[in-house]
Image (spheres, rainbow, N blue to C red):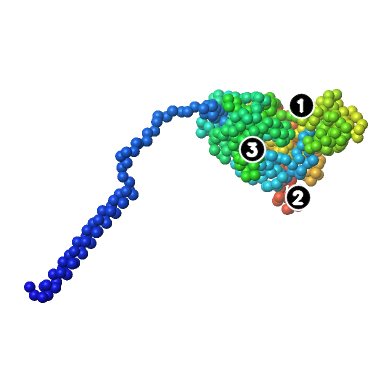
């Protein structure tokens, strides 16, 4: 072996040892990493017990039973606006010193739930929704008036039925914010049981069912927080902390037995949603309104046309040395009280010889007095007693300038085409009388004429071409000057009869040409047969 071979041999040994060492290191590292990744990926836990899902066993509770019982009677209501006409909710309303036989005082809790009525917002045609509940197997439903106030079409969907039922309006009462509608399902419907709201106590369980934000059959629970919240005239609410949100309007508030004790109507909130303070109209009040509506189609309340405030009422009477009575802050111009000689600052002491305790007593007794009846009113005027005679009139007529009653009059002037009968033909129009200024502008010599404010879609009037703003002078050559005139003519018509409307129609082209702005025309149609 030469010298070079001797030198190479140790180097080869060294390199060989290094290679073997590196190889072993790589193998060990690979094994270690493989073990780590295996741990990260998961290994079978042989000592763990698998979870098992038990057989379904329903845990019954009073709330469960209540929901199952009442949900079929609760409905979701959607409405399509009829026109762009203003309603009580979007008209500007100037603050008043007090409501007639009641008060406003700027504390309108409904502005939180339905929008501030003192903000002038142009009416927008948008679909709205709310809730209601069936109270009669024939399909009669109670809901809030503000849910259907601007409705052209009303659709109802039941919780267990995907059918959209077309509903018709039976009657409304703006003062209590209630409405009655009806659907024809072709079979008897499940209906809610009515309770007695006088039996409700603070601390009782309260359950609300409705469609908040359009979510059908939502159930929330709480307690009765307070009773008799006197927030608005004719409305002493039940207060609850059961979650009530927009869309719950018109739905039922229930006791733990599943009986309706109230109609969910309003919430007090700064965000527009639930904040723990909701209000329901007591069912005892709602039932009285419902019974009158299904009997007469509407609710009529008497009025003498005075306003007062509850603020410091007792202190005012004490200052005048009186023990009972109602201090009058305002008298409606042209109303019964003004005609009888009642003035602002008078104190009403007696009605027909019986003392008046306070404003609520005055409201109750006057509103329940038959329209047209004369009552004797004793007033204190600067310390002197005076006996006056006052004729009670319909509240809607006395306060016809109020937006809520204007809206109601337009609706009353609408003849729904959904349920015509052989003895009463339905045209499908809403009308208002012409003012003297209207007659002068149109150069009308006769005292006839009504302005069309609404034409119902798919109605007889729409079919023959009547339009909003048309002025109807006569029907079948008989002059008309009011809704009653039209109703009287309708009562003598039957399906298949011809009808001739004599109409004055606005004509922008004629105005530009210098001719009269209204052009006469005749519109002819035949009442549809059933």
The answer to whether marks 1 and 2 mark residues whose Cβ atoms lie closer than 8 Å is: no
SS category of the residue bearing label 2: loop
Quadrant where the image shows the N terminus: bottom left
From where the camera sits, is residue 106 visible?
Answer: yes
Look at mark 3 in the image and give the residue it sits on: 277
* Residue 511: mark in rendering: none
Identify the image quadrant of residue 164. Answer: top right
Relative placement, left or right, of 351 versus 117 is right
Relative placement, left or right, of 212 versus 88 is left
From where the camera sits, is residue 79 visible?
Answer: no
Look at mark 2 in the image and give the residue it sits on: 515
Residue 334 picture location, percent across and down? 84, 36
Q: CA distance from mark 1 to mark 2?
A: 53 Å
Look at mark 1 in the image and give the residue it sits on: 368
Q: Nearer the viewer, mark 1 or mark 3?
A: 3
SS category of the residue bearing label 1: loop
2 or 3: tag closer to the N-terminus: 3
Q: Nearer the viewer, mark 1 or mark 2?
A: 1
1 or 2: tag closer to the N-terminus: 1
Q: Which residue corresponds to the image point at 71% horizontal and 40% vertical from the top-left?
A: 108
Q: Which residue corresponds to the image point at 17% horizontal and 70% vertical from the top-left?
A: 11
- For label 2, the crowd category at 10 Å Cα-Cα, with few meaning under 14, some 14 to 19 and many 20 or more, is few
Quick check: 461 above or below 122? above
1 or 3: tag closer to the N-terminus: 3
- For label 3, the crowd category at 10 Å Cα-Cα, with few meaning under 14, some 14 to 19 and many 20 or more, is some
Quadrant where the image shows the C terminus: top right
Relative placement, left or right, of 237 versus 367 is left
Q: CA distance from mark 2 to mark 3?
A: 60 Å
């Amino acid at each position: 072996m030469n010298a070079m071979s001797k030198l190479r041999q140790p180097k080869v040994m060294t390199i060989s040892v290094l290679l073997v060492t590196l190889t072993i290191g790589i193998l060990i590292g690979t094994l270690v990493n493989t073990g780590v990744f295996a741990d990260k990926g998961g290994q079978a836990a042989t000592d763990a017990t698998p979870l098992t899902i038990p057989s379904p066993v329903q845990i019954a509770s009073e709330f469960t039973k209540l929901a199952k019982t009442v949900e079929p009677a609760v409905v979701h209501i959607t409405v399509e606006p009829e026109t762009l006409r203003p309603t009580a909710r979007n008209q500007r309303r100037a603050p008043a010193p007090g409501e007639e036989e009641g008060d406003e005082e700027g504390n309108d809790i409904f502005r939180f739930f339905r929008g501030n009525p003192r903000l002038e917002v142009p009416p927008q045609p948008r679909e709205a929704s709310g809730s209601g509940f069936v109270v009669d197997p024939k399909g009669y439903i109670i809901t809030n008036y503000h849910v259907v106030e601007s409705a052209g079409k009303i659709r109802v969907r039941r919780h267990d039925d995907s059918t959209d039922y077309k509903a018709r309006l039976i009657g409304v009462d703006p003062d209590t914010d209630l409405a009655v509608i009806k659907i024809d399902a072709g079979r008897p419907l499940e209906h809610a049981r009515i309770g007695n709201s006088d039996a409700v106590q603070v601390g009782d369980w309260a359950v609300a069912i409705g469609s908040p934000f359009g979510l059908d059959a939502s159930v929330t629970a709480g307690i009765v927080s307070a009773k008799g919240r006197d927030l608005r005239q004719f409305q002493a609410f039940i207060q609850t902390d059961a979650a009530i949100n927009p869309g719950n309007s018109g739905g039922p508030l229930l006791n733990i037995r599943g009986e309706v004790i109230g109609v969910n109507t309003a919430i007090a909130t700064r965000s527009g949603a639930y904040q723990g303070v909701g209000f329901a109209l007591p069912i005892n009040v709602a039932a009285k309104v419902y019974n009158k509506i299904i009997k007469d189609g509407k609710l009529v309340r008497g009025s003498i046309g005075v306003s007062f405030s509850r603020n410091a009422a007792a202190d005012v009477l004490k200052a005048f040395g009186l023990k009972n009575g109602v201090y009058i802050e305002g008298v409606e111009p042209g109303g019964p009280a003004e005609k009888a000689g009642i003035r602002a600052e008078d104190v009403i002491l007696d009605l027909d010889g019986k003392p008046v305790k306070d404003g609520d007593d005055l409201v109750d007794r006057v509103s329940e007095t038959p329209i047209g009846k004369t009552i004797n009113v004793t007033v204190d005027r600067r310390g002197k007693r005076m006996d006056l005679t006052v004729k009670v009139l319909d509240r809607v007529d006395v306060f016809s300038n109020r937006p809520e009653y204007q809206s109601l009059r337009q609706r009353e002037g609408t003849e729904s085409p959904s349920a015509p009968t052989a003895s009463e033909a339905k045209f499908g129009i809403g009308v208002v009388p012409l003012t003297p200024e209207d007659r002068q502008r149109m150069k009308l010599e006769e005292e006839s004429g009504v302005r069309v404010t609404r034409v119902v879609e798919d109605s007889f009037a729409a079919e023959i071409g009547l339009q909003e703003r048309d002025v109807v002078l006569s029907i079948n050559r008989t002059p008309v000057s009011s809704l009653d005139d039209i109703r009287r003519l309708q009562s003598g018509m039957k399906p298949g009869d011809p009808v001739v409307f004599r109409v004055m129609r606005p004509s922008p082209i004629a105005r530009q040409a210098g001719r009269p702005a209204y052009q006469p025309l005749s519109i002819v149609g035949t009442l549809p047969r059933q």
